[in-house]
Image (cartoon, rainbow, N blue to C red):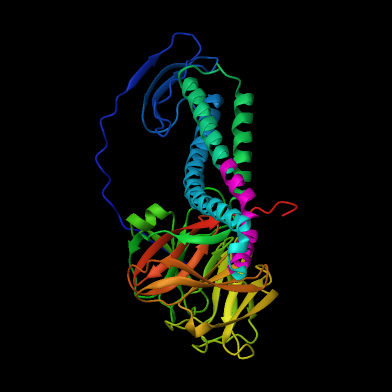
């Protein structure tokens, strides 16, 4: 069942529109577009001759021009596509520069260690053998990172090249706003498509890596109770920026849908979806148009399709603890935590067989069957929260006060390590923490605040021979 909630808002007074009167006496129409490509224009009146050409048109900054001019529509679409790519490139540039600063700092340390190693090697007779072996082992461990540093420098140059190409395309499109037909549309379209393809390939290349840092929190909104979850769909089609919002951790079955992040931040306009069962905990995830959640007081996972408003699949997660048997440290029926990363859908929980320690299971998103499972030695009840990035589970050491990410289990190598990554717990109570691979950001519910964190990933590019 779907309910729609709307709040009427007073529209701001419209600005005085400067009308432009274009009079054409039997000549072909010369298109006039706004100087700002984000501003569209509205036809207020028009007349056409027997051949369908505009004779007189009055326009103002609202929507489009003469509806019969297909080239204007094509140009507008290209402008929108280039603007979208410009935003993506800005994000890519910020991430690449941030990662580059990290590896350049490492490069300085690495070069210093290499120099020190050569000095020790030359004077090894005057040094203790144990110290010599330790330095040599460390050098051998870091040596493969040198080609990685070179790859990062190449990536930074590639992003700069993308920025220059987009600037050139924008310049061409701006000229076309004044004089249509001066540039071959097909060639322009091919240039835009080629750049878009290369940009996508570059983004994919930088998509995965090892977590090395978490930004300061960005508070998006303050709403709801102390506990809850919110998210966007990492597999949503282009242009779909809906936000999903679930208040509380039990005895609730209403999911709010906001049309966009802007709506979520600035209004109370939402659509309400009623789930067939109440959820348990805050480990829900929206993935490819469906919400996956743990049915209250059970170890059943349900896939609910928003498009059909019905359950498309449900399955028991055998042996998984539930009903506060193996919750996170903060409690809240958080026994089963569903999450998504670049590799797909995961479930994190604990079992009696594994002595209450964390179990990681890769799930088939269509059938909910377990594809593969990994058992860890980390107690579930000692974890504050956890999230998956690139097949690695990262665990925080608590949920209140000072917090850090201190444990990582890699499903790719079936190994774990203790790490130390600062994590600012701004509002002192984390009850939900999930990674979105499309945004490359952590979504958190922090004591009634909906918060975002950007993450820094170190991309280890392994070449043959290393």
Residue 175 is at least partly visible in this image: yes
Tell me which residue sits at (53%, 83%) in the image.
380
As drawn, is 393 to the left or to the right of 281?
A: right
420 or 145: which is nearer to us? 145
In the rendered view, tell whether residue 405 sits above or below residue 298.
Answer: above
As drawn, is 1 to the left or to the right of 142?
A: left
Q: What range is drawn magenta here?
A: 131-154
Work out which residue is located at the far right of the displayed protein and give it: 465
Q: Residue 45 magenta-drawn?
A: no
Residue 285 percent coordinates (x, y): 53, 68
As drawn, is 21 to the left or to the right of 280?
A: left
In the rendered view, tell whether residue 465 sits above or below residue 68.
Answer: below
31 or 319: which is nearer to us? 319
87 or 308: which is nearer to us? 87
In the rendered view, tell whether residue 75 sits above or below residue 244.
Answer: above
Residue 147 percent coordinates (x, y): 64, 48
As drawn, is 133 to the left or to the right of 422?
A: right
Q: In which quarter of the image is residue 24?
A: top left
Q: How many marks?
A: 0
Residue 118 percent coordinates (x, y): 60, 54
Q: Quadrant of residue 125?
A: bottom right
| Quadrant, the C terminus | bottom right
Tell me which residue sits at (60%, 35%) in the image.
195
Residue 390 is at least partly visible in this image: no
Tell me which residue sits at (47%, 81%) in the image.
328
Magenta stretch, main secondary structure, is helix
Q: Residue 146 magenta-drawn?
A: yes
Tell me which residue sits at (68%, 69%) in the image.
413
In the rendered view, tell whether residue 365 sits above or below residue 188.
Answer: below
21 or 356: which is nearer to us? 356
Residue 444 percent coordinates (x, y): 42, 67
């Amino acid at each position: 069942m779907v309910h729609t909630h709307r709040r009427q808002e007073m529209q701001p007074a419209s600005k005085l529109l400067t009308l432009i009167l274009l009079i054409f006496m039997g000549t072909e129409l010369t298109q006039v577009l706004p100087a700002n490509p984000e501003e569209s224009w509205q036809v207020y009146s028009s007349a056409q001759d027997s051949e369908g050409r505009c004779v007189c048109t009055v326009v103002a900054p609202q929507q489009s021009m003469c509806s019969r001019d297909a080239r204007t529509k094509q140009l507008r679409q290209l402008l929108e596509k280039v603007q979208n790519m410009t935003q993506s490139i800005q994000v890519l540039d910020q991430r690449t520069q941030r990662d580059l600063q990290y590896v350049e700092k490492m490069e300085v340390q690495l070069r210093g260690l290499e120099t020190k190693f050569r000095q020790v090697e030359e004077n090894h007779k005057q040094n203790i053998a144990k110290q010599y072996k330790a330095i040599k082992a460390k050098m051998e461990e870091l040596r493969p990172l040198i080609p990685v540093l070179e790859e990062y420098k190449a990536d930074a140059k590639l992003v700069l090249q993308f920025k220059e190409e987009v600037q050139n395309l924008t310049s061409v499109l701006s000229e076309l706003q004044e004089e249509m037909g001066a540039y071959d549309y097909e060639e322009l379209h091919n240039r835009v498509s080629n750049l878009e393809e290369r940009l996508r390939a570059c983004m994919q290349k930088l998509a995965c890596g090892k977590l090395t840092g978490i930004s300061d929190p960005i508070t998006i909104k303050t709403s709801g109770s102390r506990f809850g979850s919110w998210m966007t769909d990492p597999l949503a089609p282009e242009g779909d920026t809906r936000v999903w919002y679930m208040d509380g951790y039990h005895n609730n079955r209403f999911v709010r849908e906001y049309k966009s992040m802007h709506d979520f931040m600035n209004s109370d306009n939402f659509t309400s979806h009623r789930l067939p069962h109440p959820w348990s905990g805050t480990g829900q995830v929206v993935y490819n148009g469906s919400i996956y959640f743990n049915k209250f007081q059970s170890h059943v996972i349900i896939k609910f399709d928003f498009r059909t408003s019905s359950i498309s699949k449900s399955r028991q997660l055998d042996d998984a603890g539930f009903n506060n048997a193996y919750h996170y440290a903060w409690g809240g029926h958080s026994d089963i935590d569903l999450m998504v990363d670049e590799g797909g859908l995961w479930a994190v929980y604990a079992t009696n067989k594994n002595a209450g320690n964390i179990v990681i299971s890769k799930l088939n998103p269509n059938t909910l069957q377990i594809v593969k499972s990994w058992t860890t030695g980390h107690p579930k009840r000692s974890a504050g929260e956890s999230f998956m990035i690139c097949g690695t589970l990262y665990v925080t050491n608590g949920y209140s006060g000072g917090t850090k990410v201190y444990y990582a289990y890699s499903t790719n190598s079936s190994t774990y390590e203790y790490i130390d990554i600062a994590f600012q717990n701004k509002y002192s109570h984390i009850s939900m923490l999930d990674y979105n691979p499309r945004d490359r950001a952590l979504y958190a519910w922090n004591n009634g605040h909906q918060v975002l964190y950007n993450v820094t990933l170190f991309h280890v590019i392994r070449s043959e021979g290393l």
